Amino acid sequence: VIRDAVAADIGEVLTLMHSVAGFWDETWRQDVLERAFDCSGTIALVHQDRDAINGFACAYDLGFRAYLSELVVTLAAQHQGIGASLLSEVERRVADRGCSLIIADVWRNAEAFYRAHGWTPPPVVLLRKRLVGTDG
Ligand SMILES: CC(C)(COP(=O)(O)OP(=O)(O)OC[C@H]1O[C@@H](n2cnc3c(N)ncnc32)[C@H](O)[C@@H]1OP(=O)(O)O)[C@@H](O)C(=O)NCCC(=O)NCCS
């Protein structure tokens, strides 16, 4: 079952994110999930089977467009359609909010998954800049 993520899920979602090799970014703040859940326009969803959370998706309605920031399914639960269900639910909610475009920077090995769900590369370049706060 897919449901909205709540603050009480944070510990389990953190464990899930750490369990998928290469997923956790060491530059993320310790309270990254609290901050992500608190943002205005957040759509944070978990997939739960019995007592265990085995999938997580997080997207944002940014007004001009929506951004899918995270989608992850535990290794043991992959290839059962959970990723597809989470992605469709995110897309449905974003569209229902009136957003006609959703973007994401995705792992290269997940590109086929997104393309299979109708995602295509936009005619733009994705740039990034690493930032350091003034306190170091
Ligand atoms: C990508 C991911 C979310 C897909 O979740 P999932 O629950 O396994 O996906 P589904 O079961 O709905 O769909 C699986 C289908 O999508 C495609 N697919 C899924 N992951 C794929 C991958 N890494 N590469 C290529 N195709 C993939 C395949 O067609 C696959 O079909 P199959 O199950 O018959 O092999 C999951 O593999 C995952 O968490 N990966 C690690 C983290 C990640 O890559 N996140 C997305 C990057 S932003």
Image (spheres, helix red, strand yellow):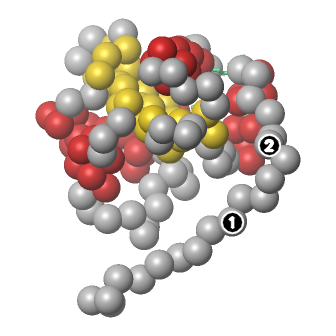
Q: Where is residue 28 drawn, in percent x and y?
A: 39, 64
* 47 lies above or below 24: above
Q: What residue type is labelled 2?
A: Pro
Q: Which amino acid does label 1 sit on?
A: Leu
Query: What is the crowding at mark 2: few (fewer than 14 residues within 10 Å), some, or many (at least 20)?
Result: few
Q: Residue furthest left?
A: 8
Q: Name the residue under label 2.
A: 122
Report the residue at 41% width, 45% height from top: 17
113 or 50: which is nearer to us?
113
The residues bearing labels 1 and 2 have C-alpha atoms spaced at a distance of: 13 Å
Q: Is residue 100 visible?
A: yes
Q: Is residue 87 visible?
A: no
**Can you say which quadrant of the picture contains the C terminus?**
bottom left
Local SS, label 1: loop
* 16 lies above or below 55: below
**Residue 125 located left or right of residue 47:** right
* 80 lies above or below 75: above
Local SS, label 2: loop
Q: Where is residue 124 drawn, in percent x and y?
A: 80, 53
**Can you say which quadrant of the picture contains the N terminus?**
top left
The numbered mark, 1 or 2, whose residue comes first in the sequence reads 2
Q: Where is residue 131 drawn, in percent x and y?
A: 47, 78
Q: Where is residue 51 drawn, in percent x and y?
A: 23, 18
Report the residue at 31% width, 16% height from top: 3
Q: Mark 1 points at which residue?
A: 127
Does mark 1 have its CB less than 8 Å from ligand 1? no
Image quarter of residue 64: top right
* 134 lies above or below 131: below
Report the residue at 20% width, 30% height from top: 6
Report the residue at 47% width, 61% height from top: 25
